[in-house]
Amino acid sequence: MKKLLSVAVLAATLIAAPADPVAWKLQVVSAAPVKPGVRFNVKLLATVQNGWHLYSMKPMAEGPIATRIWIGDGQPFSLAGGVQAPDPQVVQDPTLGMEVELYEGEAQFTLPVKIAPGTAAGAHALVVSAAYQSCNDKICLPPKIVKVELPVTVAK
Amino acid sequence: MTARILTAVSFALALYGALAQTPDTDKPSARETPPDQKAYMDVIKITDPGKKIEALEKFRKDFPDSNFASGVDSLILTTLIQKMPDQKPRIKKAAQAMYAAAVAKDKAASKSNIVVTMAARGAAANRIADQLLTGDMMLKDAESYAKKGVDAMQQSIWIAEQREAFAKRKQPIPAQEELVKRFQQARAARIATLGQVERKLGHTAQAQKFLEEAYAVNPASAPVAGALGEMAAKAGNDSKAMEYLISARLTGNAALSANQAFEDIYKKSHNGTTDGLEAMLDTEYHKRFPNPVHVEAYKPGAARTDRIVLAEVFTGSGCPPCAGADIAFDAAMERYGRKDLAVVMYHLHIPRPDPMTNPDTQARAKSYSVTGVPSFAIDGKKTVGGGSRDMAPGVYDRFNKDLEKDLDTAAEAKIKVDAGLNRGSVKVSAAVDGVESDSKDLKVQILLVEKEIRHLGENGVRFHPMVVRAIGGEKAGGFALEPKGKGTFEATFDLEAVSKSLKAHLDDFESKREGFKFSAKRDQINRADLAVVVFVQDDKTKHVLQSAYVDLSTGPASHPTTEANNLK
């Protein structure tokens, strides 16, 4: 009986945590040859599960943590300009008593990227980081950072 | 954590593509921050208004395509209104520029939209009116913009745009009834702005009409309830004023003038003092927000054992869906005595800052691999998810079955606790014996809890029971217990030190979040309202073998730590 109970307890503790409600995907936009020193665009597509939302990139002191997107150090790629975000939905948050900006469904961000001069020809990994926070009507998730990779071949 | 999803993506020339998404804990360094974001963050830190406006204009020129540029007009207007209120012509011009930009945006959007949109101009007009209202200036202009904001809200167009937006985002389109409801809520916010402007202009009848219309749709709006309350107070109708002003006060977001009006009326009937005011609000809170979970006192059956069930709840006062879980556990504490059920609440800064969070509750969340709030565990059986206040009965039903079952399950250890408060310290001695588990991961946890903290969080919950203030052991990790072992475990909580640690954590949090200040820091410990919870747990599976609860209450008086120390 005790063993049965232990098994049941263990099974119960393994109840799945909520799946990540935002899927991130990187795509290249430009069809032009990419050489060191050249600028090209990549698109970061956030697909937000139904019922969830992603906050916009505008910082709000009193509100939830804004979404941040960047290209980290230690790679031959860097941002050549600001990240372009789609217009967010502006929604009155009754619990905050203020307007918040958010995305539902799909949101596509455009990142201008440049390749450092002198980068060797061949395959390199472009790694884009995104920090975000999300809630639905049943649970709020802590801030999270994901890295999304896109292998890029640099031309001679 | 290391799982990767790789999907081949083809592209034209020298590039090939693939996708990989991995969670990470690194934070962006200043050097990694996108240039427009860095520039924008630098600009909003400027305190000199003239320099700030200059920098904002430069930002717009340097980064015309940045998505932060869309907020520049609004920030310039806010800065002018708040810091340079004498410069009326400049304010007027900034408002006109902001509105003109929104009209241009609508025109551009209308070319590809199925309807001629007025969304941007409506939102901009309402924002301008709201800012002028906040600055209490140029109220005729504010009225004009507020009317534009309302006029832009046409139900058929708004719903058509919403449908199009949902389709574009590849989301299911809500039913017509739901869309109408959302339209009414969105319009009520615009009507509320117009009503408040009319009130400031002295157009009482119009203000009353608009504000009551907004209140009917959203009675939880603090500005609307506050304005109606102040108007009733001015008209000499104290009882009606109190109804509205209590509503406003209980949101925690009431304007200073509304709170002042409330206190003035209260004093009239209480010999000129505010004595008993919070107690009255407590009563009103319970009256207006009755617990939707209806319970009866627990009557143990023949199978009841000596087990004290432990409920561990991870929550946040700024977390809307935590309200349903908090309220469900309030009901559980009403049904079961503390000899049947011990409850501990670990507060966390999710999604917004919570002044009852501390490093020990965060360590506990990490130990439990908490992935969101609310999460709760009955004797270690973890589950996640709550909901709004009215969803509390469903949450209660989810955990109560486990709870009832555990009450009839024999304890797997014996705990005898001696605990007391003496000279500013809580000393706990827990003798553990009769452990049946041969796990190598057993731990004895000793928690100091405050039995109730009154704090009106953003989720509307006013009372927070069994708030964990400190956890014994190295890094709040408890005390190791040998397999089938026994022993006496001791913890001492110096209340002054605990209080200082709570404050240090909150101060540190503020310093790291630009522009944020807690409305109240709950670092004071009420020495008269403490309890200790001890339990034996398998740290790996989180299964709880037995728990104990010791009430240290000394009476109804409140003695915040610092006050008590000052009395020494």
Image (tube, grey):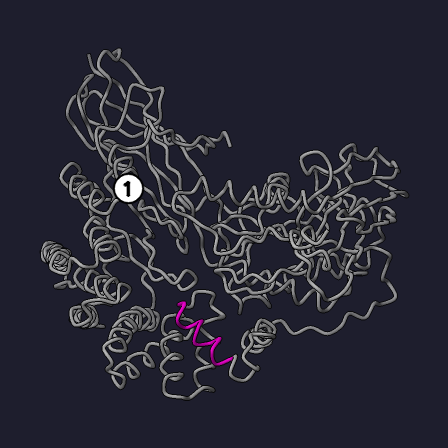
Say which residue appears at 14% left-offset and 64% top-offset: B115
Is residue B81 or residue B397 the one in the foreground?
B81
Give the image location of residue B437, x and y in percent.
83, 39
| Residue drawn at (72%, 56%) of the image | B527
In this view, B95 is above or below B501 = below
Residue A108 as seen in the image, left or right of residue B424: left
Taking the magenta stretch, the answer to whether it contains residue B257 is yes
Chain of the residue where label 1 is placed in the rendered structure? B
Residue B491, position in %: x, y?
A: 78, 41
* Neighbours of disc 1 within 10 Å: few (<14), some (14-19), many (20+): some
Instruction: Farthest residue to the right: give it.
Output: B434
Q: Is B506 left, or right, of B298 in this rendering?
A: left
Question: Can residue B59 be seen from the camera position used here?
Answer: yes
- Position of A55 with respect to B568 (left or right) is left
Q: Circle 1 sits on which residue?
A: B46
Residue B550 among those drawn in magenta: no
> Main SS type for the magenta part?
helix
The stretch of residues the image draws in magenta is B255-266
**Which of the two residues, B499 or A105, is positioned nearer the viewer here?**
B499
The answer to whether residue B112 shows anywhere in this view is: no
Helix, strand or loop at label 1? It is: loop
